[in-house]
Amino acid sequence: MNEGRDVASNAEIEMRWVDAWEAVHDIVGDRHDVPVLLPDHSVVTVQELLGWLQDSVYLGYAVRVEAGWVGHRQGLIAHRAPPDFDEGRSGPQMNTDAHGSETREAPSAP
């Protein structure tokens, strides 16, 4: 049972990694030897990134790539998050109580 959660179809999953691959190619263009920084801080090739993106999407992660600096070279930065991750509501300042209501933590004293 999916208990109210959206379950991505195979077609939706394939579109996610195809979209990610297109973003990579849009950023990289015809450059060669572009370094890629993965979330675990390893530096890989673009070809390795493409496989990582596909694997991540099939594991249920939301993925994103952006241009950035890898060492002293312009490259790609790869990100992934669980599919129910909401960047606007993440972090220690926002929590959800047992009933699904938002609660805010008090700031800690310096």
Image (cartoon, rainbow, N blue to C red):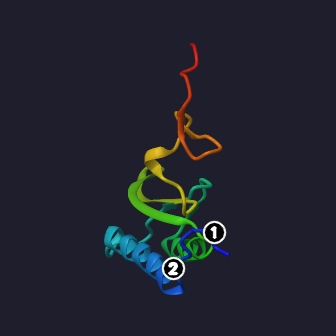
Q: Residue furthest right?
A: 1
Residue type pointed to by label 2: Ile
Residue linked to disc 2:
13
Query: In the figure, is residue 10 to the left or right of 24?
Result: right
* Tag 2 secondary structure: helix
Which residue does the image show at 51% across and 79% down from the upper left?
13
Mark seen at residue 3: 1
Residue 87 in the image: state x and y as whole percent.
Answer: 46, 50
Residue 42 in the image: state x and y as whole percent.
Answer: 60, 58
N-terminal-most mark, 1 or 2:
1
Q: Quadrant of residue 30?
A: bottom left
Choose between 104 and 77: the one closer to the eye.
104
Q: Residue furthest front?
A: 99
Choose between 61 and 5: the one closer to the eye.
5
Q: Residue furthest top?
A: 110
* Tag 1 secondary structure: loop
Q: Is residue 105 above or below residue 36?
A: above
Which residue does the image show at 37% across and 76% down from the upper left?
22
Q: Quadrant of residue 51?
A: bottom right
- Mark 1 Cα-neighbour bin, 10 Å: few <14, some 14–19, many ≥20: few
Which residue does the image show at 51% across and 44% down from the upper left?
90
Q: Nearer the viewer, mark 1 or mark 2?
A: 1
Which residue does the image show at 48% across and 86% down from the upper left?
11
Residue 36 in the image: state x and y as whole percent.
Answer: 49, 62
Q: Quadrant of residue 15?
A: bottom left
Choose between 53 and 49: the one closer to the eye.
53
